[in-house]
């Protein structure tokens, strides 16, 4: 038992590591926030485009979505960070991470928004077009507000997943929370920082886990 | 006089602070067909469900064929296998067809071999007139057919006693008849039955006894003719006047 | 950057062929971890769900119901913490309290417990959604509690659970590549090693290709299952 406290909950180590972890947390939060925002925009954009039902465009979108939902995210991270320099695009780690998360997240969000848009009865579109509303007006004033109800549970679930995925940036050496924790673990020869990082993630994400469950129950068909 | 099959001794049932059964005493003999009648909330279904302990009695004793089902260390599964129950909402197993609904317990509880079980199942399905629907799934059957399969399922276990909990209340009017006919057949074959129902016609025709419950107590217990034509208790008169 | 350079760097056929056997060996390891994790995680999740449902509805005395709390903690923690973090804790932190697990099994253990947490929630929700009348009918025929669960409730719950469960299982399978971070010689690790060795990103693209070929049918299959069961 004392071994657990000494190795996992070592107060002295916690104090010494706290600044490093704080820096890491900031990076994680910035990365999560920005990537989430961009991924939602990309997903929304693609879903709306798909609704236009232009065959060639649809095919391209489907390829994008299938590809990036099939490819493991960690592989995507590496592809972006290690191979883009060969193309002459050398992105700093942070932006590589943002790009990878946005591409991956965007594919998932597109599917979620598409399901939401398609779940709205066709009659809604017909009624509002018959009233004279344009495509854009129909989308934003009639379809999307209704789609939000359908979309909210899976979207929060996906947002949760995206935030969890920011940890993969540690693999390309971005100093986010996990990487900093590993750093501290290395230099202090004590795994307490790892446990601290885990607990910080828990505090950050557990409410979202509960929220997702609540939303799923509330909006279940 | 045939022997006593079900003996209910001072049965009380509380749901939280609510006393739903306030001391029921009943004796039911072999081949009795007992109809439990009464206003809603009187405790009829609760009483029925206590008999096979789907509801746990709070106090009192219930004896099935001499053995106390409310006793300690009793083999409840075994005793339940000797009592058949038919539910208001049928509760057929949707993932199994009619035949399989009837064979499941035969195989798992009576440990019959599949072939034997299927023969028995076809027999009971024939008894309710549905052997040609043996391979059909419940969702493809009408309400009346589903309930008859449910009756067959209970019968396949060769029970000493059959309990019916408002068997026709969830059926469309034109389907009620086929189920009641099946139940009348059963009664004529000598099955001991306890039926909670609002079908007075059935009670008059098939019941050997009618027990009227009101607010957790039996207020009238007599032959159908006497209860319907010459009720004694004022509340019985009140109840009958509302529905007849 | 002209096309010849492109092919020299990214789709270098020579490198592709040279590295292919090694990459395939890595793919086998990936598949092994995935197969083990999926089956054990699935089974464990189902067992935990049955335990939780039984604890919740059996009305047994407080003694046994206390067991519910550690279960809830287990399930919530494993679903909230990123898989990579759990993996690193299992492999790097546990040795400090004398629990040393070889990489391969550390990865399997991690994915098994993570999947079991998600699977438990899915199974529990579906089991609880099955109408109570089903259990009553089964028990009234004389089937025991476990028999009622096994032959009546769980088969029905399973059908409803399958779509969310398959998509979660695919997600876990993709996470298996995280094992490369703790040094397991899976497809990704082999690809990175080859890339450093040859200073050429073709192996990484080859790995990406292999992953896509492997997962695309799975993703499509799960979408098909979801659609079919939505009926």
Image: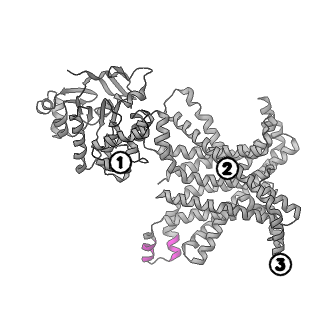
- A44 horizontally vs A99: left or right: left
Where is residue B140? Give x, y as percent. 36, 53
Magenta stretch containing residue A29, yes or no? no
Report if residue A138 lies within the magenta region.
yes
> Residue B95's x, y, as percent?
44, 48
Q: Which subunit holds the residue at mark 2?
A: C
**Circle 2 — which element?**
helix
Q: In which quarter of the image is the C terminus of chain B?
A: top left
Q: What stretch is highlighted in magenta?
A: A125-139
Q: Where is residue A108 in the image (x, y as percent from the top left)?
A: 62, 62
Between the C-alphas of marks 3 and 1, the distance is 70 Å
Marking on residue B134: 1
Taking B98 as reference, is C204 above or below it?
below
Residue at 37% x, 27% y: name it: B14
**Which residue is tagged 3?**
C4
Chain label for disc 1: B
Residue A153 visible (yes or no): yes
On the image, numbered disc 2 is attached to which residue? C35
Q: Looking at the picture, does residue B127 appear above or below residue C64?
A: below
Magenta: main secondary structure equals helix
Q: Is residue C221 left or right of residue C94?
A: left
Q: Disc 3 sits on a residue from what chain?
A: C
C-alpha separation, residue under disc 1 versus residue under disc 2: 40 Å
Q: In this view, does C121 lie above or below A221?
A: above
* Quarter assignment of residue C199: bottom right
Is label 1 in contact with label 2 (beta carbons under 8 Å)?
A: no
């Amino acid at each position: 038992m004392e071994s657990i406290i000494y190795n996992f909950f070592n107060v002295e180590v916690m104090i010494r590591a706290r600044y490093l972890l704080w820096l890491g947390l900031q990076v994680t939060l910035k990365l999560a926030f920005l990537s989430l925002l961009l991924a939602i925009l990309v997903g929304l954009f693609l879903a709306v485009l798909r609704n236009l039902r232009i065959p060639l465009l649809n095919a391209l979108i489907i390829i994008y979505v299938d590809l990036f939902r099939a490819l493991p995210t960690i592989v995507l991270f590496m592809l972006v960070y290690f191979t883009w320099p060969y193309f002459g695009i050398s992105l700093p780690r942070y932006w590589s991470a943002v790009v990878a998360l946005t591409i991956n997240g965007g594919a998932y969000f597109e599917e979620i928004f598409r399901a939401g848009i398609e779940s709205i009865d066709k009659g809604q579109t017909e009624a509002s077009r018959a009233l004279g509303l344009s495509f854009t007006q129909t989308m934003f004033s009639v379809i999307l507000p209704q789609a939000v109800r359908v979309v909210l549970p899976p979207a929060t679930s996906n947002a949760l997943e995206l935030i969890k995925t920011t940890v993969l940036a540690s693999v390309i050496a971005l100093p986010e929370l996990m990487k900093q924790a590993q750093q501290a673990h290395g230099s202090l020869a004590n795994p307490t920082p790892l446990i601290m990082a885990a607990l910080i993630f828990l505090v950050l994400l557990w409410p979202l886990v509960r929220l997702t469950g609540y939303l799923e129950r509330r909006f279940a068909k | 006089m045939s022997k006593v099959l079900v003996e209910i001794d001072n049965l009380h049932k509380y749901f939280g602070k609510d006393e739903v059964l306030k001391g029921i005493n009943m004796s039911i003999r072999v081949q009795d067909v007992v109809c439990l009648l009464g206003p809603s909330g009187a405790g009829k279904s609760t009483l029925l469900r206590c008999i096979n302990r789907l509801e746990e009695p709070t106090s009192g004793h219930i004896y099935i064929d001499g053995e106390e089902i409310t006793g300690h260390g009793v083999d409840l599964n075994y005793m339940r296998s000797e009592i058949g129950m038919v539910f208001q909402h049928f509760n057929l197993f949707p993932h199994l067809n009619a035949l399989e609904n009837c064979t499941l317990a035969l195989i798992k509880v009576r440990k019959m071999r599949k072939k034997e079980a299927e023969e028995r199942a076809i027999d009971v399905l024939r008894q309710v007139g549905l052997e040609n629907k043996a391979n059909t799934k419940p969702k493809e059957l009408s309400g009346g057919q589903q309930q008859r399969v449910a009756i067959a399922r209970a019968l396949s276990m060769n029970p000493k006693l059959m309990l019916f909990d408002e068997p026709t209340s969830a059926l469309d009017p034109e389907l009620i008849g086929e189920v009641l006919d099946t139940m009348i057949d059963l009664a004529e074959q000598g099955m001991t039955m306890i039926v909670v129902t609002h079908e007075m016609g059935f009670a008059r025709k098939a019941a050997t006894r009618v027990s009227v419950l009101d607010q957790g107590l039996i207020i009238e217990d007599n032959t159908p003719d006497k209860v319907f034509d010459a009720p004694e208790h004022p509340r019985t008169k009140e109840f009958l006047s509302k529905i007849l | 950057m002209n096309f010849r350079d492109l092919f020299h760097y990214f789709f270098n056929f020579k490198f592709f062929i040279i590295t292919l056997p090694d990459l395939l060996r890595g793919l086998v390891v990936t598949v092994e971890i995935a197969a083990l994790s999926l089956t054990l995680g699935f089974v464990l999740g189902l067992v935990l769900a049955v335990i939780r449902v039984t604890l919740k509805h059996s009305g047994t005395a407080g003694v046994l119901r206390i067991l519910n709390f550690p279960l809830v903690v287990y399930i919530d923690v494993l679903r909230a913490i990123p898989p990579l973090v759990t993996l690193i804790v299992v492999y790097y932190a546990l040795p400090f309290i004398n629990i040393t697990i070889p990489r391969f099994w550390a990865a399997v253990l991690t994915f098994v417990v993570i999947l079991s947490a998600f699977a438990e929630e899915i199974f529990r929700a579906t089991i609880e959604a099955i109408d109570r009348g089903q259990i009553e009918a089964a028990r009234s025929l004389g089937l025991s509690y476990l028999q009622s669960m096994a032959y009546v409730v769980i088969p029905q719950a399973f059908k409803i659970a399958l779509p969310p469960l398959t998509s979660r299982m695919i997600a876990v399978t993709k996470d298996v590549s995280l094992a490369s971070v703790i040094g397991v010689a899976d497809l990704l690790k082999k690809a990175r090693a080859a890339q450093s060795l040859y200073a050429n990103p073709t192996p990484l693209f080859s790995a990406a290709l292999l992953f896509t070929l492997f997962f695309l049918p799975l993703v499509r299959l799960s979408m098909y299952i979801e659609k079919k069961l939505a009926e």
